[in-house]
Image: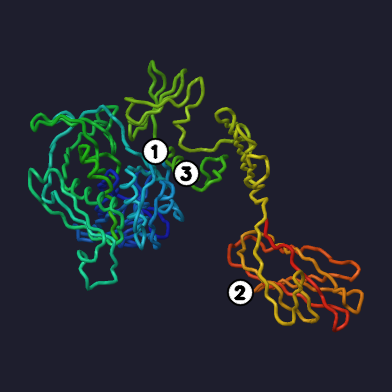
Amino acid sequence: MVFIRDLEGEEYFLQGVINHEQELNGDERIDIDIEYTDMNSEFLDKQDDLKMWIILFEGKEYRIISSKQTGFGDKYQISVTAVLYILDWLNTSRIYQRIDESLTVTEAFNIVFNDTPFTYSTVESAPSNSFEGIGEGETRLEIFKTFIDRYGYEFKIVGNVVYLYNQIGNDANFEYRYKVNAQNIEKEVDASEMWTYARGYGNYSDDDSDTDVVEKAKLKREYTSPLAKIIGIREAPPIRDGRVTQQATMDANLKKIVDESVQISFTADIYDMSQQGYDYQHAVLGDRVFLVDERIGLDTEIRVVKITRNFSSTGQILDLEITFGSGNMGDQYGSNLSTAAKDIADLIQGRKSLPFQALDIISKSMVTKIQNTTSEIIYDTNGQHFMDKKNNNNIMTMNSSGLLLSTDGGKTAKTAITAEGIVANTITTGALLTQNVNVIGKDALMYMNGDQFVAYDKNSLSRTTIKPSGITIIRPDGAEYIVNGYLKMDLEIQKNPLRYHTVEFDGRVNLTKESSHQYFEYFYTSHKARYLSISYAASWDAENSTESGEVELLIQEFGNKTGENRTVKQLISVSKSANETHGNIQIDLGVPTYEPLQCYLKFRRVGGSSTDKACIRSTRIYMRG
């Protein structure tokens, strides 16, 4: 069944023929003509403008982005177009800062998915890549499109998780043949915008609008295809982008425009073999299959790059059309995401949520997928086969030797569990209870158990320990460097003299007769540790007429941008017979903010006569913790 959800969260049954379209690395959308029927009247009587409503189909959510009402019979119908919710969300959220740097895969896709209700999982790695001019008001979807193109990824969406692969789909060893399970096979070559030559202009400012880009561009590049020798020069529209400053970036863009300008595609209407009980219903996006039509000399392995399906209200497939492409065509479908701005309750009862938000989203998505699957069990000499009724390509086989997983109808499979143990390659998410499991590295130089991770260097005393309380690092010589996240070393602060005429300096100490606070030093630093320590030595001048008195030391912050400058005072008892009195003032500055911190050091005489002198010097100023 298909449901529709209004803006207040109420859900209704939806009746209508559903046209579902999905492209490789592209849009996933639904088109429905919603007729005014008894079933649909439940929500149409309340609201006939369905924009921004949600359609729920096959366990996914689609946002309605356009609707058109027309007369139909005695009533009316509403034609709506809805796109996959995650794609619509990413297309309406923007990144405003400009990014010019080399990014790892994690750094890049964190830009897209941080602070969103979605996450991603990198199934296969890719090298770092350099980017120029990313952001600057682009939508997250536009940036995502750029990243998958540059890293060479293909993606698959399950729930709120985007999985990134080098190539999705399976080597299906499956054949679509004219008059057997396919008809109306067509080959289309579009060379109306075929280019063999392109120019690019970059590294210029848009401030000087009176000067032509061709003149002011500091970066000028050209690319000519080898095909130009055969069919001549066919010039592509030039690239004009002042944000591009690197030659390699411009060359890659020019080559891509020219090399991908010829569009080749095959389409075919497919018979739904599931109605005849065939155990391989149809290919999925990215599958490598064989397409055969002797009439046009076609017999080749080819990829599925687009699938269009029409469903009845009861979920029966009415029509199925698949678009295929060669290897180059797969590149042509590199990232066909539509960016309209530019172009138009517990997961499982008794289980705790995973501690990391990203894994929590992945887990929920997988649980949703399982809950939305209806399976059937088949027994044969090889064991039990658990098959997804909606897609018989998804099979789990279990027998006394172990458990196998397959996504291509059993043609190939991954071993998940045998008598020897669990194969980690088949684990995509979950929680390991480390109090019951030890993870040990090669030569036992790294292990994880309970709530800590420890790594050793076999050639020194170096050791790193990570625990919930923080990280501890032991240097190669055995000395502690960081303990529970705190540096053991002190951060020294450079102090500077600041004396008025009321303060004397005898080359060692500062002296004053004043009973009001007098400047003698200041320092500049930043709030980069929790505790500020000032060590001092105070004394009563030997020439004083009285035997003893007190020196008051004042530390006074200035220039705090909040306007709340902090002060700390300490009264120090001194006498002529005691020589110097040493001490330390430690100030708790709170959690480090790394904001600028600057303070005056002042002192004054307390007690004695008006001719007596109080003496002081700072011996050390530092931060720690």
In this view of the protein, can residue 461 be seen by the observer? yes
Residue at the disc numbered 2 = 559
Circle 1 or circle 2, nearest the eye = 2
Q: Position of residue 514 (x, y in %)?
A: 79, 82
Q: Quadrant of residue 492?
A: bottom right
The amino acid marked with disc number 3 is: Lys
Between 148 and 518, the one lying in front of the other is 518
Dot 1 falls on a residue whose secondary structure is: loop
Dot 2 falls on a residue whose secondary structure is: loop
In this view of the protein, can residue 322 be seen by the observer? no
Between 144 and 617, the one lying in front of the other is 617
Mark 2 nearby-residue class (10 Å; few <14, some 14–19, many ≥20):
few
Q: Earlier in the sequence, mark 1 or mark 2?
A: 1
Q: Are marks 3 and 2 in contact (CB under 8 Å)?
A: no
The amino acid marked with disc number 2 is: Gly
Residue at the disc numbered 1 = 124
If the image is split into quadrants, where does the N terminus sit? top left
The residue furthest bottom is 610
Mark 1 nearby-residue class (10 Å; few <14, some 14–19, many ≥20):
few
Q: Which mark is residue 364?
A: 3
